[in-house]
Image (spheres, grey):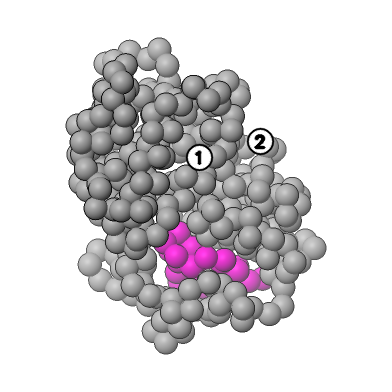
């Protein structure tokens, strides 16, 4: 069987590279014709540790795709999920499935279009960037968790996926992917806030702890109300950022997170890169819709403020400033500052 990777960018490209290197048959389908052509001419190139390695892999544009797909790794931006899932649903084999190797809460959107029995849940914390057509820069190891949606028991197809994706790194199976996704929701809110300024993520999280702690606490308040059991991953400990935790415990967890981030080759988020380098809309305004929809209007002032600030920066990225985070700190501490 073939792995069809729909979206050959940072996440999709990284996973496709390692699957091919391990001997799996892979087809990359991407909307970017220039990216596809570069892969055809030079192979898919991965930059790690300052050197580039290429693998030969089949690639085509969406318009060029023919036939059907059985195992699909969906790695498009969150805002493109509905359209991509609709397209896949018309081409998916009856016993095929789609794995959401994306940021955000995309499984319900996929299931509506391909069916819940053909949807596999995933959590990805993978640091990578597309630095030029056909070239993905690996930004350091992260976590990858696969499971059935809704907390169902780990199935054979999940075990098979985990086995194959361990070609990339420490993939694992879980019956609580939702717990990882909501934990990433809190961590991702911090990373989204760092994109309001032009500085390393670790430095901004350390300097603006009030804002960062407040953002995670908002997201986790929604998760707690839904009965979600949060899962730790990499160096992020969600239990330290729920309401009621001591300042000492929270500070110690932040120090460990910051220290880990400083070991990663990628020091700025993909959100920052979308704004500052690629000058394109960010996906967080789409994938936090799930969190916003589950909360009362007044419950998430910090998250709403961050998303509003990112929308402003989509129009004018020159407006990045650490003053935005200073104001966010004030809002977190109960002032009337507004980013």
Question: In the drawing, does residue 155 fall left or right of residue 138?
Answer: right
Label 1 vs 2, first from the N-terminus? 2
Give the residues in magenta: 1-26
Q: Where is residue 204 in the image (x, y as percent from the top left)?
A: 23, 38
Q: Residue 288 carries which label?
A: 1
Which residue is pictured at 56% across the width and 77% down the height?
61
Which residue is pictured at 31% across the width and 20% down the height?
336
Quick one: quadrant of the C terminus?
Answer: top left
Q: Where is residue 2 in the image (x, y as percent from the top left)?
A: 63, 71
Is residue 101 depicted above or below 218 in this figure?
below
Which residue is pictured at 31% across the width and 29% down the height?
338
Instruction: Identify which residue, 74 or 331, lies in the foreground.
Output: 331
Q: Residue 151 carries which label?
A: 2
Question: In the drawing, does residue 112 fall left or right of residue 142?
Answer: right
Q: Where is residue 82 in the image (x, y as percent from the top left)?
A: 63, 55
Instruction: Identify which residue, 281 or 202, lies in the foreground.
Output: 281
Could you give the CA–CA distance between mark 1 and mark 2, rounded to whole angstroms? 21 Å
Magenta-drawn stretch contains 125: no
Front position among marks 1 and 2: 1
């Amino acid at each position: 069987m073939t792995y069809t990777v729909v979206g050959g960018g940072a996440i999709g490209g990284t996973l496709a590279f390692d699957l091919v290197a391990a001997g799996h048959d892979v087809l990359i389908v991407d909307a970017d014709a220039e990216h596809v052509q570069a892969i055809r001419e030079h192979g898919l190139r991965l930059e790690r540790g300052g050197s580039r390695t290429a693998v030969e892999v089949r690639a085509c544009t969406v318009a060029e795709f023919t036939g059907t797909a059985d195992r699909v790794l969906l790695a498009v931006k969150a805002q493109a999920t509905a359209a991509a899932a609709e397209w896949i649903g018309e081409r998916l084999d009856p016993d095929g499935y789609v794995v959401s190797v994306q940021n955000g809460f995309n499984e319900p959107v996929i299931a509506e279009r391909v069916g819940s029995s053909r949807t596999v849940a995933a959590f990805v914390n993978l640091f990578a960037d597309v630095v030029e057509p056909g070239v993905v820069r690996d930004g350091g190891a992260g976590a990858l968790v696969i499971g059935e949606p809704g907390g169902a028991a780990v199935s054979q197809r999940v075990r098979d996926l985990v086995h194959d994706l361990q070609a990339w790194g420490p993939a694992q199976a879980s019956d609580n992917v939702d717990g990882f996704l909501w934990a990433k929701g809190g961590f991702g809110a911090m990373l989204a806030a760092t994109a309001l300024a032009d500085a390393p993520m670790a430095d901004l999280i350390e300097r603006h702890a009030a804002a960062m702690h407040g953002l995670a606490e908002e997201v986790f308040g929604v998760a707690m109300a839904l009965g979600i059991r949060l899962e730790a991953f990499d160096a992020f400990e969600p239990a330290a950022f729920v309401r009621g935790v001591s300042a000492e415990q929270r500070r110690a967890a932040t120090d460990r997170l910051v220290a880990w981030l400083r070991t990663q080759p990628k020091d700025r988020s993909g959100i920052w890169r979308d704004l500052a380098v690629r000058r394109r809309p960010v996906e967080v305004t789409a994938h936090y819709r799930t969190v916003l929809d589950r909360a009362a209007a007044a419950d998430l002032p910090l998250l709403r403020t961050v998303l509003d600030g990112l929308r402003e920066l989509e129009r004018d990225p020159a407006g990045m400033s650490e003053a935005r985070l200073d104001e966010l700190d004030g809002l977190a501490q109960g002032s009337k500052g507004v980013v």
